[in-house]
Amino acid sequence: MKKKLVAALMAATMVLSLAACGGKDDGGASGGSGGSGGGGDMYYNTYLQTEPSTLDSIKGNDNYSRGILMNTMEPLTRLVEKDGEQVREAAGAESWESNEDGTVWTFKIRDNKWTDGKEVTAADYAYGITQTLNPDAGSPNSFFTASFIKNGSKVVNGEASVEELGVKAVDDKTLEITLEAPTPYFMSLTDTRACYPVRQDIAEQYGETYGSEAENFVGNGPFKLDSWVHNSEITLVKNEDYWDAENVKLDKVHYAIINDETAVFNSFDSGQLDYCSTGSEEWVGRFDKKEGVDRIDAVIPSMRFDFFNVNDELFSNLNIRKAFVLAVDREDMAKTIYQDMHIPAYWWVPQAVSTGELGDYRDQVEGPLEKMAKEEDAKELLLKGMEELGLGSDPSKIKVKYSLSATTQWARNYGEYVQQKYKDVLGVEIELDFNEWSTFQQKTNSGEYQMGNMTWSTDYDDPMSMISLFTTENSSNIPTNWSNEEFDSLIAQAGKEMDEAKRVDLYAQAEQILFEEGCNICPLVNEMQHIFRYSYVKNVDEKFTSTAGSKYIYIEGR
């Protein structure tokens, strides 16, 4: 059995669902040709904890859909592992270049086909990018590109038309993207869903139902969506018309949708799943003893956190929000709830996020909550806030509905722990509100909540991926309804600052404001993943940042 520590660089969204979605090139022929086993063995069984809300890359932003989209769609580029290092390889674009100052980028779109047989064009990429910024589309992914594509912010804010965006299809095979200014992390965004192509005719044909069923979706990636049995399973099959089909070794990728962790672990133990990820000390110990299984421990750029609706009467008060943030004993939570499987978090930008040559951002900047926790008392802040709101001085009269995005037994145990801790530290009453993911999204997006809990992962390797979520124009992503002009200004400056040290300083100032003047979020733990997979699964990327999907995975010796 192999045990390996991996410091992952970035990720995207919710919990436990994506670690199976990576493939790499181990050198030699791409996709691990040679010793790739018989065709009958070329299937990969993995899982999702809940089904995607949609496969519409414009309207969806959850990690559950991201894993499927990485396999069924072809972004402009992919980030893959080669010889232990990550490299950006050509994907939907066969080549790219920029002008001298890096403000105009030209991508040559390669010959490829959609799964219905039509040719992929530059116009398909242009439509996907522009619709993501079109306020009429209501995309939660506009924050990726709004601040740096020419006129992006103006379009999102309704101050300019979509036609004025710096995105155009010069011809069928040439895509041109014009930026507001040189952007240090631009190429890191070309593998995100904000740069996926979308077939305008198909999207318009199905409207709101586009991407909700297997028959309402077309892709252009290494796999095609074969079937989707809601709340049960999703099956992908190899796309024989894919431009690089010869290097795709898997015939099928099967996702079981299993929202019960014990069922996941039992399925892996019995060989029904080829992979699982667990934060349970018991199961880690069990799988460590299992023959023919590899283990990877990964510190990943993903945060578990609470967040507050600042439009709510109670949480409109800064001191109340600070009280709830500082009342959390993160060390105890990491030990008691997570069995030391995750890291206590005193920051918003997680570990394993780089700023470039200077390395990990968290090695350069102290967590803002570390200082606040030493200087301020949670109970005193609560009483001060209650006085400011005219709520008297009896914390037991404060009742807060705490909305969670899961209904599992683990979620219930977690909720009861939080409920008791807030009562012990602050004396307040917590009402637990358990929801399936789709219901949770509906509640929080509509502002029908007081306090919520979820997980967020980075989408590209720069602090901007996390910290820009709280700018006024990106406030729909984590709908706290908080806004701060100074914070917005600092993020805008950082997005254009090519000097890395200066950019780090701008990020640090913004993150400080996020807690000192916002405290609309409450970081809990910085995630680690403890990944187990059977040794017959080969060529899997071990960095969480990978966007190779299952493209290069193969099976040998099942």
Image (cartoon, rainbow, N blue to C red):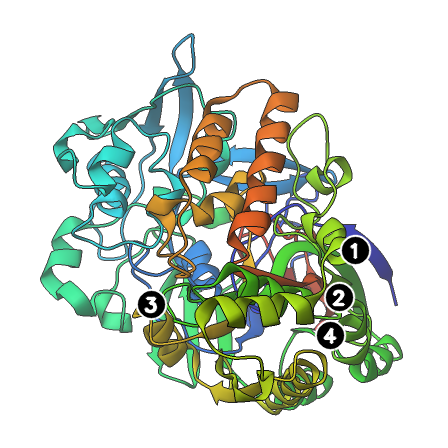
Dot 3, crowdedness within 10 Å: few (<14), some or many (≥20)?
some
Dot 4, crowdedness within 10 Å: few (<14), some or many (≥20)?
some
Give how far apart the Cα atoms at labels 3 and 2 are: 28 Å
Q: Can you identify the residue that label 4 sits on?
A: 279
Q: Earlier in the sequence, mark 3 or mark 1?
A: 1
Image quadrant where residue 461 sits: top right
x and y percentages locating residue 553 in the rendered image: 60, 57
Q: Earlier in the sequence, mark 3 or mark 2?
A: 2
Dot 1, crowdedness within 10 Å: few (<14), some or many (≥20)?
few
Q: Can you identify the residue that label 1 sits on?
A: 374
Q: Earlier in the sequence, mark 4 or mark 3?
A: 4
Image quadrant where residue 176 sits: top left
Q: Nearer the viewer, residue 342 or 544?
A: 342
Q: Can you identify the residue that label 2 sits on?
A: 342
Please report the residue visible at 70 percent of the width from the left and 82 percent of the height from the top.
421
Q: Can you identify the residue that label 3 sits on?
A: 445
Q: Amino acid at mark 4?
A: Gly
Q: Nearer the viewer, residue 302 or 191?
A: 302
